[in-house]
Image: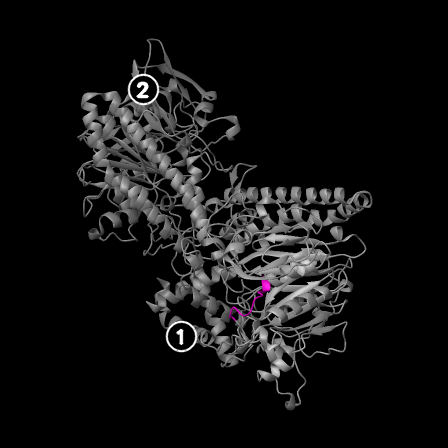
């Protein structure tokens, strides 16, 4: 064969190529994690939009519930009246624990009973919850991201009575505004101690007017209620109305000005706790910075090789005009930015689906995605949209209408790119039954989540082709519902003026019917993808034919040949 | 991005070299091997054959990998029947590949709309048999496997004049014959009398009984044939596979020189040579001996010269007789008709052959990075493996002379892609096959159709192939190997019953086969579910431990390729 004559030249080329490859393989990696901070790059992403930064004047926050083994079930807790002297039991609810015997929300009351209770309030508000409380009937909304804390502040002792999940439930039950919610959660955490299952955490807390970043840490294992000191340290900063922000598992609050009460709130120990724990030295002359003291995170998108890409990426999507570079250290990025254009609900939905395509952290760059450009093979970089998401909630609070109608939780089960957002108004009185059941370990055709996983799994076979089918379904079942919301709002408002109960029934019926339709459509879509991409056959059910796959990308073909040549030379 | 530590000149050289190198790789010539005047189908069925002295247990074996992808896959059991004098057997035009929407009905009912206009007297008794796309096994242990081989184009006869087609011939053989030789004679004579073609061209059938395995090849005789011409309406030839040998037909004619005087090894139509001469496919004056395949269906080329499109012949011979060191460059037409295997083979060996993906050969479908990060053999379709993704089902027929016919004959049937499927036995004597085998098509997922259970698992195996295939292999151990082991025990029980009460024996076999099939089909639906749970989101979930595992690290060649492609892309950008 002709090739044989050229072995020496090819050998030379191989040496070159391999050398270059190895240089890259062994180049340094920077995880972006400071040594004494507990932190995860794999947790949830919170996107926040102020009311003057959105197209329709709503505030929006998201929670991509990134876990992969958590309980994904949702529930609705009705409003309730309580007698004076009643107590509210406090449960230890771990974010991650699941049980084979049933769902978390059935079992935590026995399995998580801490034996501790606090005085109940006379009236508790209705709310929707998943892993956390998300939206109550007053349009107080919450989204969560784990940010980690300086290790020495961890308090896993039973002295800390309140976990993060419990805190969000109490916030939902008791508050009418974002500010009230923050104060209630902060007070409870200080009084009864925060920690046990959780440490450094962030909540986006919003209502129709304001969006706040609330961050909370435990205060170390030695805390006792008898010490008289606060059992938690927390801080909150408001996102300016015309700004947007993001929390990608990194503390976002820097320097604080507690005199500016419309923008900052904190526990009384916010600085003293740092000083006592040698996390801040007032004599240094440096101003106090919350994130640098309690949850410092060195590194940038580039230096972390994309593990810390989300902060840069989000700002770059919403405000490209700022030309923020991927090598800017995350801690130097501003608390919030003014977007180049106000964001619509669809913009936020799309942003939760972001895979960093076309950036230096593109998961299908080169041949990472294989022959069908699958973005899920390459887990080396961190995208906003990842495969291990339980669900994504997008809470929308809208002033100028009754709270029951103004508040909407948009919920998409499983990976955002293959899923469908379904609206759940704040005023609905029930959850679809299929949202309340299921787990990761048994395929359950009665569980809504599995409909989306079924489609998602089938997309993975020939991703680049199948994702186009999914996008069509999203147009039909998601975009059209987004368009329909103003009409539903209007009908609900008309009804509300006459009969509040009727309005809530109307909203409940709309949301449940829609959810049922979407879930059924996704089971069908999964079936259709199986038929179409079966045996890579590209079957056409209408023409009753077998089609042809698009030819693989040139880079894939090139890489295949290249590796063959290399293998021959190695022989 | 960091500055790279090499100079512009080195860059330039590197780029130039790499492009030259790629161009070279791309220029590897691929030779389809088809003569200009021949339609050679490379993507159809593979027939493996084994003589009774080439198998461990003394059975004869044939296979049919029904490689299509759009065909009707449904199966039926046709019962034996007695007919009154005067009853007629109608001929139907049956296309191998046609399928109908399920709402219109089932193929084997609907073909009756396509009466070919010919009928012949029924026999007083017709045998019961199992059939899918073709007839496979009757209650006399007559067995058939099929492969399309193509023919010199001028012999095509797509006119409606010929009234028989390959499917119909197999059905008539099943109904009327007890031995391979009888079947060949019947099919040959009907084809000659009523003409062969219309929906079919050059075809090969393996025809077996407990004693013998024959290769039967048949061609039409051109569009101008009429019954009134007095000439045969088909040309055919048959050669017996010696008892101690195995052979294969991978869509290529296998019969070379023939010696009709040796009637235990050769049979042919009367026009076998004259038809070639008349059509200028053979010149006796050339001095060369007549060769059936060179005349009627020549396919020059080798596994290597065809870039692996025609690797099956070499691959099978190399698998069964590695000692003979067949070369990948040996032209396929120079391969012997059959070969003595290094070791006698078993039904389970044959199952493994039908699953063969050419791993470790020059035509390995996951060589380099062809298989992607999870070594999926179905991405790369440029080479042809015995096991391909478009198989409707695979049959392995076993005829065993030491047992009564209803017990001796077995059709092993696996739906869909062999490597993710499960062979299920059906004795020749079964009086029914599962309902789930009667229904379903490619275009509508049907949970009542057995085939879809296997497609469900197969599809779910494609996501993380290299990992999921291990789960499938475990299930095959449990539901296939175990049943293979159990066959001698079932044989014995059936034989005992048969001696006392034939009907009871048939009932026993039917119950065993149907129960087993039901169990396997249910297991494959479950397996599909389990693969979905386990490989969901590439999460490697463990349902017992209730945790999320970690995938095995990507192969080093994959990692290397990813990095190298990045480097090349960087270089191109700089250029």
The mark tally for this picture is 2
Q: Position of residue A202 (x, y in %)?
A: 62, 68
Give the magenta range. A156-165
Residue at the far front: name it: A85
The residue under the point 58% across, 48% down is A435
Residue B201 versus residue B484: which sits nearer the camera?
A: B484
A161 falls in the magenta region = yes
Which mark is on residue A15? Answer: 1
Residue with the mark numbered 2: B80
Q: Which of the chains bears the disc numbered 1?
A: A
Q: Is residue A445 left or right of residue B554?
A: right
Q: Residues within 10 Å of mark 2 (few under 14, many from 20)?
A: some
Image quarter of the C terminus of chain B = bottom right
Magenta-drawn stretch, dominant element (helix, strand or loop): loop
Q: Position of residue A293 (x, y in %)?
A: 61, 80
B68 falls in the magenta region = no
């Amino acid at each position: 064969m002709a090739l044989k004559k050229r072995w020496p030249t090819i050998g030379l080329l191989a040496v070159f190529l391999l050398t270059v490859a190895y240089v890259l393989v062994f180049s340094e990696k920077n995880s972006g994690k400071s040594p004494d901070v507990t932190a995860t790059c794999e947790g949830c992403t919170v996107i926040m939009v102020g009311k003057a930064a959105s197209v329709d004047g709503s505030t929006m926050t998201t929670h991509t519930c990134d876990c992969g083994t958590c309980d994904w079930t949702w529930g609705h807790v009705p409003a309730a009246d309580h007698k004076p002297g009643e107590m509210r039991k406090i449960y230890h609810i771990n974010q991650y624990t699941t049980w084979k015997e049933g769902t978390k929300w059935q079992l935590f009351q026995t399995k998580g009973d801490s034996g501790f209770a606090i005085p109940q309030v006379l009236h508790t508000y209705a709310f929707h919850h998943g892993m956390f409380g998300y939206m109550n009937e007053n349009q107080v909304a919450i989204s969560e991201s784990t940010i980690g804390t300086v290790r020495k502040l961890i308090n896993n002792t039973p002295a800390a009575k309140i976990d993060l999940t419990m805190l969000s439930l109490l916030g939902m039950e008791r508050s009418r505004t974002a500010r009230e919610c923050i104060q209630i959660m902060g007070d409870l955490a200080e009084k009864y101690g925060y920690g046990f299952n959780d440490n450094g955490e962030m909540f986006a807390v919003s209502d129709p007017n304001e969006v706040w970043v609330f961050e909370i840490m435990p205060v170390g294992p030695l805390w006792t209620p008898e010490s008289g000191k606060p059992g938690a340290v927390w801080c909150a900063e408001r996102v300016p109305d015309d700004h947007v922000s993001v929390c990608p598992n990194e503390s976002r609050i820097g320097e604080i000005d507690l005199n500016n009460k419309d923008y900052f709130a904190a526990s009384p120990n916010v600085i003293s706790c740092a000083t006592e724990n040698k996390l801040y030295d007032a004599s240094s002359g440096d101003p106090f910075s919350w994130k640098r003291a309690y949850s410092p995170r060195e590194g940038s998108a580039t230096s972390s090789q994309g593990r810390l890409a989300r902060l840069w990426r989000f700002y770059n999507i919403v405000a490209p005009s700022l030309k923020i570079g991927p090598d800017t250290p995350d801690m130097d990025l501003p608390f919030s930015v003014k977007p180049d254009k106000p964001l619509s609900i669809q913009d936020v939905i799309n942003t939760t689906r972001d895979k960093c395509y076309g950036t230096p952290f593109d998961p299908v760059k080169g041949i990472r995605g294989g022959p069908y450009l699958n973005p899920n093979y390459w887990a080396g970089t961190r995208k906003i949209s990842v495969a291990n998401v339980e669900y994504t909630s997008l809470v929308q609070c809208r002033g100028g209408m009754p709270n029951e109608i103004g508040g909407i939780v948009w919920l998409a089960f499983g990976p955002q790119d293959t899923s469908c957002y379904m609206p759940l108004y704040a005023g609905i009185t029930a959850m679809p039954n299929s949202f309340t059941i299921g787990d990761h370990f048994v395929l359950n055709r009665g569980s809504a989540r599995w409909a989306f996983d079924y489609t998602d799994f089938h997309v993975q076979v020939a991703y680049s082709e199948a994702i186009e089918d999914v996008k069509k379904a999203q147009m039909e079942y998601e975009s059209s519902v987004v368009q329909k919301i103003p009409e539903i709002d209007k009908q609900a408002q008309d009804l509300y003026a006459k009969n509040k109960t009727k309005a809530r029934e109307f909203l409940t019926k709309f949301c449940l019917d829609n959810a049922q339709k979407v879930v059924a459509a996704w089971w069908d879509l999964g079936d259709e993808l199986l038929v179409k991409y079966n045996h890579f056959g590209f079957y056409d059910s209408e023409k009753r034919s077998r089609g042809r796959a698009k030819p693989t990308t040139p880079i894939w073909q090139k890489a295949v040949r290249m590796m063959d040549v290399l293998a021959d030379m190695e022989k | 991005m960091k500055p790279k530590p090499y100079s512009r000149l080195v860059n330039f050289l590197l780029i130039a070299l790499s492009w030259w190198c790629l161009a070279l790789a791309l220029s590897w010539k691929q030779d389809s091997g088809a003569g200009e005047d021949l339609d050679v189908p490379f993507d159809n069925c593979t027939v493996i054959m084994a003589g009774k002295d080439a198998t461990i247990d003394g059975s004869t074996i044939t296979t049919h990998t029904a490689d299509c992808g759009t065909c009707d896959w449904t199966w039926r059991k046709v019962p034996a029947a007695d007919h009154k004098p005067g009853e007629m057997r109608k001929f139907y035009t049956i296309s191998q590949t046609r399928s109908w929407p399920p709402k219109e009905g089932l193929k084997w009912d609907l073909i009756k709309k396509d009466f070919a206009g010919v009928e012949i007297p029924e026999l007083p008794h017709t045998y019961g048999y199992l059939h899918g796309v073709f007839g496979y096994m009757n209650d006399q242990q007559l067995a058939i496997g099929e492969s399309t081989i193509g023919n010199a184009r001028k012999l095509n006869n797509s006119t409606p004049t010929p009234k028989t087609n390959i499917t119909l011939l197999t059905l008539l053989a099943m109904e009327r014959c007890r031995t391979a030789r009888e079947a060949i004679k019947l099919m040959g004579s009907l084809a000659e009398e009523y003409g062969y073609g219309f929906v079919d061209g050059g075809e090969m059938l393996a025809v077996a009984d407990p004693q013998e395995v024959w290769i039967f090849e048949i061609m039409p005789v051109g569009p101008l044939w009429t019954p009134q011409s007095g000439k045969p309406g088909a040309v055919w030839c048959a050669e017996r596979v010696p008892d101690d040998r195995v052979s294969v037909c991978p869509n290529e004619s296998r019969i070379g020189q023939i010696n009709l005087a040796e009637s235990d090894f050769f049979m042919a139509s009367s026009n076998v040579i004259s038809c070639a001469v008349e059509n200028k496919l053979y010149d006796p004056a050339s001095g060369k001996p007549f060769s059936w395949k060179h005349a009627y269906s020549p396919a020059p080329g080798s596994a290597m010269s065809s870039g692996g499109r025609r690797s099956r012949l070499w691959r099978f011979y190399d698998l069964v007789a590695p000692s003979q060191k067949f070369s990948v460059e040996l032209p396929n037409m120079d391969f012997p008709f059959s070969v003595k295997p290094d070791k006698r083979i078993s039904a389970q060996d044959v199952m493994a052959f039908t699953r063969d993906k050419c791993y470790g050969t020059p035509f390995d479908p996951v060589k380099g990075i062809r298989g992607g990060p999870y070594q999926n053999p179905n991405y790369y379709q440029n080479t042809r493996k015995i096991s391909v993704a478009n198989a409707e089902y695979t049959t392995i027929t076993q005829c065993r002379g030491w047992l009564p016919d209803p017990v001796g004959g077995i059709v092993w049937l696996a739906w869909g892609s062999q490597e993710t499927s499960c062979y299920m036995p059906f004795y020749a004597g079964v009086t029914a096959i599962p309902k789930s085998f009667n229904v379903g098509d490619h275009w509508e997922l049907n949970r009542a159709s057995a085939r879809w259970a296997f497609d469900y698992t197969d599809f779910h195996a494609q996501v993380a192939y290299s990992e999921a295939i291990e789960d499938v292999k475990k299930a095959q151990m449990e539901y296939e190997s175990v049943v293979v082991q159990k066959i001698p025990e079932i044989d014995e029980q059936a034989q005992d019953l048969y001696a006392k009460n034939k009907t009871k024996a048939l009932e026993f076999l039917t119950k065993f086969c149907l129960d087993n099939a039901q169990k396997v089909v249910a297991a494959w639906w479950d397996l599909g579910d389990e693969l979905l749970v386990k490989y969901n989101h590439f999460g490697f979930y463990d349902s017992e431990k209730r945790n999320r595992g970690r995938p095995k690290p990507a192969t080093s060649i994959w990692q290397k390729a990813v990095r190298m492609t990045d480097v090349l892309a960087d270089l191109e950008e700089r250029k």
